[in-house]
Amino acid sequence: MDIKKFYNKYKEANIQDVIKFMFQREFGCAHAVSNYDNALNYLLSETKSIINDGYLYVTLEDLGNETVRIHLNNDGDYKVKSGTIAKLFYLSSNVEKGDQDKFIDDLKSLEIDIDSKNFVDEYIAGGVKALHHSDQYKNAYLPSYRVIEKSYANFIEVFSKIDSLPDEAVVTIEGNSGSGKSTLSKILNEIYGCDVIKMDDFFLQTHQRTDDRLSEVGGNIDYERFNEEVVSKIQTTFNYQKYNCMITELTEFKEITSKLKVVEGVYSNHPKFNKYYDLSIFLNIEREMQYKRILKRSGEFMFKRFKDEWIPKEDSYFEKFKISNNCDIIIKV
């Protein structure tokens, strides 16, 4: 959002509110809160008149520069637990971003009247810092929101769906290689403390790589061992053995103890075991962007294997079993 769009949307805003908007767009909410408990307690205090059984309704407003306002309402686009919102705000506050010199230059380049210019000069002289909204803005718009990173806001639908699940639940993250499945699983771990079960731990062992198996659509994963070590125990505390494809051996065991469990990776929504999941997510990515990400992440040699071998197998699997069509949420990244 640029300054013109901001003024068009918030016609009662004055220069103080513009500076606040520009500050949030440049720096996000860096260092706005010291710990999660403080973030949650302040949120509960602020929203006590609109919170309903621990939930708030939210709408998103993209400020630009990978920064988003989550507006808190008693009616909105997504229903999210207050604890989830507080965690998103806390995690976002730990993200370092922004350029102070650029921010000051942007302020100085504003086309504004002399009174507003004087306000800007006094603000800069007093040191760059966060401002409150003007009383005029507060009276007109009753602002109640949190500023978070867009990398989190992109998955607000996922958080809303998870927050509606029972405490004991299993979520799967499917999608193309390079689409951000591991990134999303890491975010879910940060927010919910869930254990993540990676399909990469169930690559085919050497003795399983027969011509028949490698030609089987969806057979590029050790679904026998996954069923035995994970699916059959998914409602309990359990451990499974990880397979290391670099040394072609089963290695250490991973313990799974959390109530919310996330299964992440291609083939995680295979029809041999997808009926055991409470929520399924599919991340979709354009081919050109997929290639760029994999090349950057894995280098030339591995990229060639992805392009010539693994991606065609994934595509056949997605097509044959209509994987994305059978997922609850589809997110294009």
Image: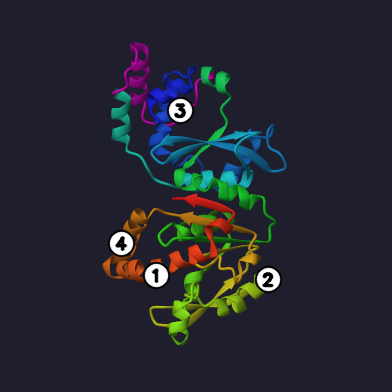
Residue at the right extreme?
53
- How far apart marks 2 and 3 lie (CA) works out to 49 Å
Residue at the top extreme?
114
In percent of the image, x 56 and y 23: which residue is there? 141
In percent of the image, x 36 and y 29: which residue is there? 127
Q: N-terminal of the two: label 4 or label 3?
A: 3
Q: Are marks 2 and 3 in contact (CB under 8 Å)?
A: no
In this view, the mark in front (4 or 2): 4
From the viewer's perspective, is 68 left or right of 41? left
| Residue type, label 2 | Thr
Q: Which mark is residue 310?
A: 1
Q: Is residue 21 above or below residue 245?
A: above
In this view, the mark in front (1 or 2): 1
Q: Is residue 239 above or below residue 315?
A: below
- Secondary structure category for the residue under label 3: loop
Q: N-terminal of the two: label 1 or label 3?
A: 3
